[in-house]
Amino acid sequence: MDNINYSLLNKRFGQHGQVTFTKDLNGMAVIEVANSHATATLALQGAHLMHWTPRKQRPVIWLSPAAKFGVGKSIRGGVPVCWPWFGPHPTQASFPSHGFARTVAWEMTDTQAMADGATRLSLRLIPNDATRAQWPHATDVALHIKVGATLEMELVTRNTGDSAVTLSEALHTYFAVSDVRQIALHGLGGSDYVDKVDSGDQLKHQTGPVTISAETDRIYVGSTTECVLDDPQWRRRIRIAKHGSRSTVVWNPWIEKAEKMGDLGTRGYLDMLCVESANAAEDTVTLAPDAEHRLWVNYSVEVLR
Ligand code: TA6
């Protein structure tokens, strides 16, 4: 049973017909967004966007049909917020992979019905004793989301302490695709990457678009360019624009790893591709006192005639 006061949340932050706070069928406290451009659903836990579907389009963000839900449990799919570290903790193996942001409570700070018909949501992570034990630094982290014909997300970290702090992060986005074997990801040609499927100690070099025919887990470093996910079967392209991110992570677990994960569904590996705008591996972010860092993405869909 959560102790969330939905009527108070709807009173303070609801936007009639556009933003509604409710408990979903999985018992999660969620924000339902519906406007003239799109619909979206976001779990308050982890400020985790689970769905975004522009009007007259198929869903753009993929959520596993076998996702597991619960307090402190990471949700398979959507846009997990990986913060304040990406991947395994650099020194503490017992700390959660991809940091704690995606599994702790966040609070609403603002909602806006925009003049252009889009909806803007702002949330802030609520630190607690457990997060402070894992991250003894004075930092605030907020997520701003604009749900419209495109999806804009901005992860903002401010160093409120008096010493420098270094972090890594990602918006770990699962994109819905017709068949991962049929797509091509453009924009990474010429970049070097860490290939986590093999030893990962030698940088490899990408030539041409990325295609998927086996387990793929790559951190493209020094990668600041826009990517385009070409899905000819669904006759669409998803444009992945970003600022404040120097790494792009491309991940698909493929068959064997997907089966072991247990929350991807029987054909989940075919239905999704993660293209993550990140600051990971050598691309960590160091913030001086009072400095802030903004990781911004914009997802848009182009219909192929
Ligand atoms: O972003 C790719 C990755 O780091 C993979 O190595 C895989 O672990 C994936 O994230 C999912 O991680 P999760 O902790 O959500 O199961």
Image (cartoon, rainbow, N blue to C red):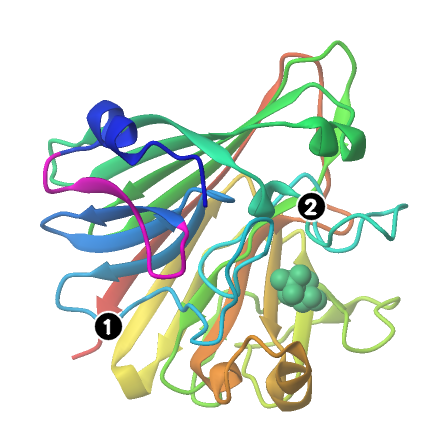
Q: Count of labels shown?
A: 2
Comparing labels 2 and 1, the label whose residue is closer to the camera:
2
Judge by depth and name the residue closer to the eye, 205 or 177.
177
Q: Quadrant of residue 254?
A: bottom right
> Residues in magenta?
16-28
Disc 2 or 1, which lies upstream in sequence? 1
Give the crowd class for mark 2: few <14, some 14-19, many >=20 residues within 10 Å. many
- Residue displayed at 59% across by 68% down: 250
Label at residue 135: none
Judge by depth and name the residue closer to the eye, 260 or 257.
260
Q: Main secondary structure of the magenta part?
A: loop
Judge by depth and name the residue closer to the eye, 218 or 206.
218
Q: Is residue 224 above or below residue 176?
A: above
Contact between marks 2 and 1 (CB within 8 A): the answer is no
Residue 33: percent from left, percent from top: 22, 47
Judge by depth and name the residue closer to the eye, 188 or 53.
53
- Residue displayed at 21% across by 55% down: 39
- Judge whether residue 25 is colored magenta: yes
Give the crowd class for mark 1: few <14, some 14-19, many >=20 residues within 10 Å. some
- Residue displayed at 34% across by 61% down: 25
Q: Quadrant of the N terminus?
A: top left
- Identify the residue under disc 1: 58
Label 2 to label 1: alpha-carbon separation? 31 Å
Q: Name the amino acid type tagged 2.
A: Gly
